[in-house]
Image (cartoon, rainbow, N blue to C red):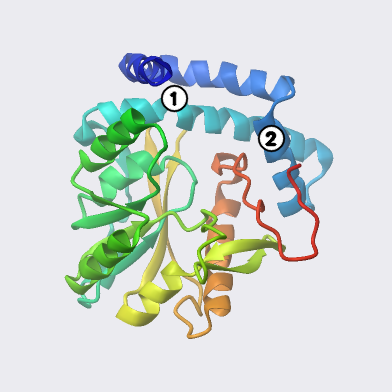
Amino acid sequence: MRTRLLLWLVRLIAALPRRFLYWLAILVGTLAYLFPNRERKTASLNLRLCLPELTPGVRRRLLWATLVENAKTLVETPAIWYGDARYWAALVRDPSDGELARRLLAAGKGLIIAAPHLGSWEAGVHKLAQIAPITALYRPLKEGSLAEAMLAGRSRGGAHLVPTTAAGVKALYAALERGEMITILPDQQPPSRTKGAGVFAPFFGVPALTMVLVNRLARRTGAPVVFAYAERLPGTGGFELHWLEAPEGIADVDPLVGAQALNLGVEQVVRRCPQQYQWTYKRFRARPEGLPRLYD
């Protein structure tokens, strides 16, 4: 029953006009800012940890903007999953027309796109699929019906979705060998129970359990790495796709050096558009031995 109601709500949201959805997001985000809740608490703590140079007033305004933008991501996601992929791809402007990606793909080693939880990664994947064949790694949802909706929605634009399993990783290597693109959300904490999946590396100066998958893929295949994100423009102006070459060392033989470069790349794009980052995610849930837990 719970799953059916949730799926019904998702479909209802998907049917609403985008302008109404964004007004709804402003209301939801403002309420989340005004009243105590888990998302506000997590985002507030993350902002204090990662951007201590900001004054309290600036940080409060950033917290409100973050909760509003996160709410926009929440309400627009169903619309993207159930909507016309060509419509959403057309809303994503790319002034460079993917010049960096096309140039790097010409070397024939494929291309690894690190796409953090910044802006609209749901709309962004539809735009990326128009540049070249793309395989996207995803973490399956626990709700079966929602997982099916997500899989169908993200695939609608032509992207090939593979899960975070051994078979999924194998598919990433195969795509790079074919000279295609792959995309990974680089700021997800890897499973701490999986030995060798991550190392602790600084993220905004705070130790964060960081995936080493991007480092391994780049080192073993020679594929270049770039960061990309679709910034949400004001009002209903759509999105703008931004590109950034990865910092030096992301393919280093030392996975710690690679993880440091990966986190630095995420930091660089987040600083460009901090209000649209998913600060509500418990990025520092895992802690090095001896350090206190942060989100209790």
The image shows residue 15 at horizontal and vertical percentages of 31, 15
Give the side of residue 294 with respect to residue 6, left or right. right
Q: Is 158 on the left or on the right of 212, as rendered?
A: left
Quarter the N terminus occupies: top left
Residue wearing tag 2: 63
Give above or below for 113 relative to 294: below
Check disc 2 and report its element: helix, strand or loop.
helix
Question: Is the residue marked by circle 1 packed among few (<14), some (14-19), or many (20+) residues within 10 Å?
Answer: many
- Element assignment for label 1: helix
Q: Amino acid at mark 1?
A: Val
Q: Position of residue 41 (x, y in %)?
A: 73, 34
Task: Name which residue type carries label 2.
Answer: Leu
Residue 222 seen: no
Name which of mark 1 and mark 2 comes first in the sequence: 2
For marks 1 and 2, give the CA distance: 19 Å
The residue indicated by pointer 1 is 75
Q: Is residue 171 left or right of residue 226?
A: left
Q: Is residue 267 above or below residue 248?
A: above
- Name the foreground residue: 263 vs 105: 263
